[in-house]
Image (spheres, rainbow, N blue to C red):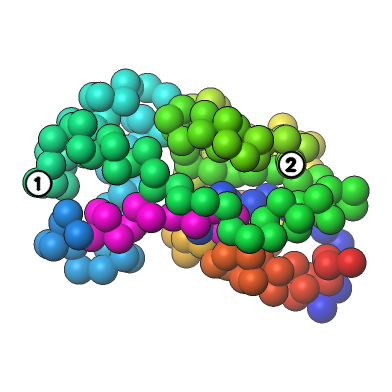
Amino acid sequence: MSHRIDAILFDLGGVLIELAGVEQMLAWSPGLADTDELWRRWLASPAVRRYERGRTSRDAFAAEVIAEFGLPVDTATFLAGFAIWPRTLFAGATDLLVSLAPHYRLASVSNTNEFHWSRFEREWALGSFFHANFPSFAIGKLKPDAEYFEHVLASLDVRASRTLFIEDSPINVAAAGRVGVAARRAIGIDGARATLAEFGLLR
């Protein structure tokens, strides 16, 4: 399949970064049925939305999430676990970005916060592998809101129809599709490479 693509948007957690948080939250919240329910509640959580738009403090966020999800931990325990939800970069992540950067405009599009983003930069210099970065806490907008994707497209000055978005959350994939972006669900580097191959973008 051949497509005309100018820009590739990468979600970070679940695509380029291995996450540990899902297992921890499910262990703390036996009332959550499964991963899909967790993500539905997380993406809609008022506490999460405030924090990942940069509108509340880390401690206030922790206290609100503990209350909202009924977690059996204190704020210090929650934050200690939350700090390492992004476990590590998947093997081959930066090599893939380096191979794509000369040919396409690359952007990271991530619902994230100052706590995690500072670690991405300090430990992996992750932002340097993209032409532009759109961490939600810095731009005050969140996926799956349409305004998030519209902001990214306008900032990059690219057409939605010539933009590919690679993301592990079906909720965010569907939202990007509604604004005209070519969006695909992929998990890990193998999933990302399969999507890029589908669009004829691997060289």
Q: Quadrant of residue 153?
A: top right
Residue 178 location (% of width, % of height): 57, 57
Residue 141 location (% of width, % of height): 49, 33
Q: Quadrant of residue 45?
A: top left
Q: Is residue 167 above or below residue 190?
A: above
Q: Secondary structure at mark 2?
A: helix
CA–CA distance in space, label 2 to label 1? 38 Å
Q: Which of the two discs, 2 and 1, labels the residue nearer the N terminus? A: 1
Q: Which quarter of the rendered picture does the N terminus lie within?
A: bottom right
Q: Which residue is mark 1?
A: 72
Determine the residue positioned at 23% across, 39% down: 78
Determine the residue positioned at 86% across, 62% down: 4
Q: Is residue 38 above or below residue 70?
A: below
The residue under label 1 is which amino acid type?
Pro
Determine the residue positioned at 90% across, 48% down: 102
Residue 41 location (% of width, % of height): 27, 52
**Mark 2 surroundings within 10 Å by alpha-carbon count, few (fewer than 14), some (14 through 19), many (20 or more):** many
Q: Is residue 178 above or below residue 61?
A: below
Q: Which residue is mark 2?
A: 129
Determine the residue positioned at 83% across, 66% down: 201
Question: Which range is magenta?
Answer: 15-26
In the rendered structure, does residue 130 fall within the stretch colored magenta? Answer: no
